[in-house]
Amino acid sequence: MRKLIAGNWKMNGLASSLAEIEALKGLTGEAACDIVVCPPFTLVEKAVECTKGAAIAVGAQDCHAQAAGAYTGDVSAGMLAEIGARFVILGHSERRLAYKEMDAAVAGKAAAVHEAGLTSIICVGETRAERDEGRAIDVVRAQLEGSIPDTATSSNMTIAYEPVWAIGTGLVPTLEQIGEVHSSIRHMLEERLGDDGRRVRILYGGSVKAQNAKAIFGVSNVDGALVGGASLKASEFAGIILAAV
Ligand SMILES: O=C(CO)COP(=O)(O)O
């Protein structure tokens, strides 16, 4: 499967950061994998302009489940589509934990993303305590079951497995642990989507760097990465992209 490498800038980046996207174009050229950059809302439209003609797609980091209405501060999937976004990250643990975003809310947002013709990147992952209690796979399966809407197919949905304890910590699960969770996600996707479940890309996220990327990409059912901190610098992000091809 063609790998997908997505960068989640989180709440980082001013207009001057678009220089990193410019630099990325030169560093990756025609890389044989799909590349997505997800800057904050304020930079989505500018990033789309900046990537015109380049093999880099642009995504957002959240959206509302409704198409329009009295939802102060929110942005709809249709609004993102109109300015050229192609992907939307949903259910990131930083949102699940900070805003008590539940699986059903994530599913509602994902359905809106699919309705708008965009691709959802649905994030799941256990906390340290859940892993220590031996519940990692059960937690991930329950999150997936609740977060995937009926509109999902392999062409409009990507899954990202991001153990909460690996995000921004420099800690990474063993390759065996990553393989175990990814194969159970694959199993669940096949149960849910039949043969099409085999074609859904499953990304790993959590302290991915240029140095550890190649080993992680060698694990079966790892179809790419969702990268936080290391996506902010073009040279580091390009190192991860090149490790995928
Ligand atoms: O949360 C992440 C991507 O969504 C991962 O973040 P880090 O790569 O900084 O650990």
Image (tube, grey):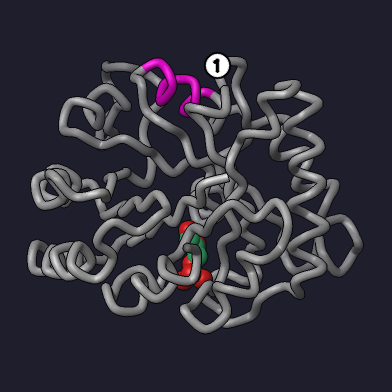
Indicate the amino acid at tag 1.
Thr
Using residue 136 as the reference point, say whether residue 47 is left or right of it: left
| 133 horizontally vs 143: left or right | right
Q: Please tell me in which quadrant of the rendered image residue 79 appears.
A: top left
Q: Residue furthest right?
A: 134
**Residue behind label 1 places its C-beta within 8 angstroms of ligand 1:** no
How many marks the image carries: the answer is: 1
Q: Is residue 46 above or below residue 238?
A: above
- Give neighbour class at mark 1: few <14, some 14-19, many 20+ (Cα, 10 Å): some
Image height check: is 154 above or below 171?
above
Q: Is residue 139 above or below residue 191?
A: below
Residue at 47% of width from left, 51% of height from top? 4
Viewer-side residue, 212 vs 172: 212
Q: Start and end of the magenta stretch? A: 108-115
Q: Quadrant of the N terminus?
A: top right
Q: Position of residue 212 (x, y in %)?
A: 57, 79
Task: Provide residue 41's location: percent of width, then percent of height.
Answer: 23, 46
Residue in the picture at 60% in, 21% down: 149
Q: Secondary structure of the magenta portion, mostly? A: helix
160 vs 79, nearest the viewer: 160
- Quadrant housing residue 170: bottom right
Check disc 1 and report the residue beneath it: 151
Residue 114: which quarter of the image?
Answer: top left
Q: Position of residue 190 (x, y in %)?
A: 77, 29
Question: Does the magenta run of residues contain 106?
Answer: no
Q: Position of residue 104 (x, y in %)?
A: 61, 27
